[in-house]
Amino acid sequence: MKLYQCVLANVLFSAIAVSADSPHFVTGFTTVSCYQGDLLVCFREVGFVERFPFIPYSLSALAVADSTCANPAGRPVPGLRSSSQTIVSVLQRLGSPLLNEVSGCISAPSSNCIATPRKCPPALNSVYICRYNNIVLTDTTNGITLPVGDIICS
């Protein structure tokens, strides 16, 4: 019986040691939002065996800016739309006092999402929308990526 318990404990501790050296993003703690027009991605990454003073993270997305004219009901008027696209790429280094975890937020400035303002005819309103598509967060040290999704910032 004791030999069986020893073997079982050895197998369990080996499995724990192997999984501890696997950095990964905790998806339940990842959020994407717009803060004062800026794209903001907050995250938590765990599973480090050794402490890194700083880890470089990359945030990338496609910024799509739409400017259109809308009628008083808020519906876009066909033919009065302009659009521009910009590839957003931000590199930021984050560190943590904790041995096996890094938590933080990375932002991309709203200056990445600019459309030429539309001059609308009378009785129509100018509407500006900024979308960030294909948002991806990457731990460049460990080569781990996390597709975050899309968001609309008005």
Image: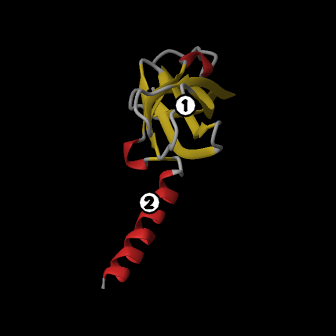
Residue ranking furthest to the bottom: 1
Residue on which disc 2 sits? 16
Q: Up-down: is 31 above or below 28?
A: above
Q: CA distance from mark 1 to mark 2?
A: 21 Å
- Outermost left residue: 1
The image position of residue 36, as x and y in percent, is 42, 17
- Residue at disc 1, secondary structure: loop
Q: Mark 1 packing: few (<14 Cα in 10 Å), some, or many (20+)?
A: some
Q: Residue at x 56, y 46 (%)?
A: 147
Residue at the disc numbered 1: 52
The vertical placement of 10 against 116, above or below, is below
In this view, the residue farthest toward the front is 2
**What kind of residue is marked 1?**
Phe
* Displayed quadrant of residue 58: top right
Q: Considering depth in this image, is 142 or 25 the residue closer to the camera?
A: 142
- Relative to the observer, which residue lies in front, 80 or 150? 150
Q: Label 2 amino acid?
A: Ile
Counting from the top left corner in percent of width and height, residue 90 is at: 62, 25
Quadrant of residue 131 within the rendered picture: top right
Q: Name the residue at 53% across, 51% down.
A: 21
Q: Earlier in the sequence, mark 1 or mark 2?
A: 2
Quarter of the image for the N terminus: give it.
Answer: bottom left
Q: Is residue 83 in sight in this rendering?
A: no
Q: Is residue 72 left or right of residue 84?
A: left
Q: Which residue is rendered at x = 52% and y = 25% of the image? A: 94
- Find residue 4 and report its horizontal and vertical position in percent: 36, 82
Q: Is residue 1 above or below residue 117?
A: below
Give the quadrant of the C terminus: top left
Q: Is residue 80 left or right of residue 94?
A: right
